[in-house]
Image (cartoon, helix red, strand yellow):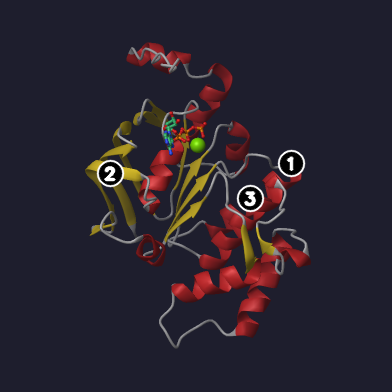
Amino acid sequence: MSTLEIKDLHVEIEGKEILKGVNLTINTNEIHAVMGPNGTGKSTLASAIMGHPKYEVTLGTVTLDGEDVLEMEVDERARAGIFLGMQYPSEITGVTNADFLRSAINAQREEGNEIPLMKFIREMDSKMEILEMDEDMATRYLNEGFSGGEKKRNEILQLTMLKPKFAILDEIDSGLDIDALKIVSKGINEMRGEKFGCLIITHYQRLLDYITPDKVHVMMQGKVVKSGGAELAQKLEEQGYDWIKEELGIVDETVELEV
Ligand SMILES: Nc1ncnc2c1ncn2[C@@H]1O[C@H](COP(=O)(O)OP(=O)(O)OP(=O)(O)O)[C@@H](O)[C@H]1O
Ligand SMILES: [Mg+2]
């Protein structure tokens, strides 16, 4: 079993504190969902774990099986087995999807032990078939001109090919039609097991209808303010967030606009 442990994580962006002490522990064989109103720091948490340079960790720790993740370079974090499926995946012209994936896989392997080309192609073909992706997506430039849903499917293709220990999936369901939602969920469910843990950031119960989370966390004002089981997501879907705010005495921050 592996463990990704986030302790009292404080993160600033351009001098503004966004995360104010996040605590979260995920083990392999578990799927956790993080929900919460817009702008409460969910994507910031994902970016900070992956080591986005804009996000400065001012306090707290992130460890993977006791190893300090925050000390690692971004590529080391990926090699250690952490994967981020982004809310807004970048487009990269000049690099085909297949080349990108093969490089990413080989970056995780020892030099001289690269994945054989035929094995790679066979695996990618079969995964693309499961995800019902057009064949030509392999040879197109990474995410360039991909529709919103195609980008999300492509993130899941990367996930199933890279087989990380921990995946953080940021709004992987946004922009997906109903069929794609089922397909993407199937891809994630197939990863479930002893060697895989997942943090799913989502706004909607409907994704969790297909992927039953072991735990659900609510983030507000840069903290995890409530955790529970799958039923918590159900309650949020029905009642929104006001009851949590009332329960915890959280007052909405006023937004300061510069004139
Ligand atoms: N690069 C940045 N520069 C300045 N502020 C930022 C930057 N990135 C994020 N923020 C601010 O940090 C706060 C948290 O943003 P974040 O993207 O983590 O929210 P979120 O919970 O993912 O929201 P959503 O549900 O809308 O995706 C927001 O107020 C946002 O404006
Ligand atoms: Mg976000």
> According to the image, label 1 marks what residue?
177
Q: Which quadrant of the view contains residue 91?
A: bottom right
Disc 1 on helix, strand or loop?
Answer: loop
Q: Is residue 63 left or right of residue 95?
A: left
Q: Is mark 1 within 8 Å of ligand 1?
A: no
Residue type at mark 1 is Asp
- What's the mark number on residue 132? none
Q: Which quadrant of the view contains residue 259?
A: top left
Residue at mark 2 to residue at mark 3: CA–CA distance:
28 Å
Residue type at mark 2 is Val
Mark 2 or mark 1, earlier in chain: 2
Mark 1 or mark 3, earlier in chain: 3
> According to the image, label 3 marks what residue?
152
Q: Is mark 2 within 8 Å of ligand 1?
A: no
Q: Is residue 216 left or right of residue 161?
A: left
Query: Could you tell me if residue 216 is visible in this image?
Result: no
Mark 2 or mark 3, earlier in chain: 2
Q: Position of residue 32 (x, y in %)?
A: 45, 43
Instruction: Say which residue appears at 43% left-offset and 62% top-offset.
Output: 195
Query: Could you tell me if residue 46 is visible in this image?
Result: yes
Residue type at mark 3 is Lys
Q: Is label 1 or label 3 in front? A: 3
- Report crowding for label 3: few under 14, some 14 to 19, many 20 or more residues within 10 A (C-alpha): many
Q: Position of residue 28 (x, y in %)?
A: 40, 55
Q: Is label 2 or label 3 in front? A: 2
Q: Position of residue 247 (x, y in %)?
A: 37, 13
Disc 3 on helix, strand or loop?
Answer: helix
Instruction: Say which residue appears at 58% left-offset and 68% top-offset.
Output: 100
- What's the mark number on residue 57? 2
- Report crowding for label 1: few under 14, some 14 to 19, many 20 or more residues within 10 A (C-alpha): few
- Report crowding for label 2: few under 14, some 14 to 19, many 20 or more residues within 10 A (C-alpha): many
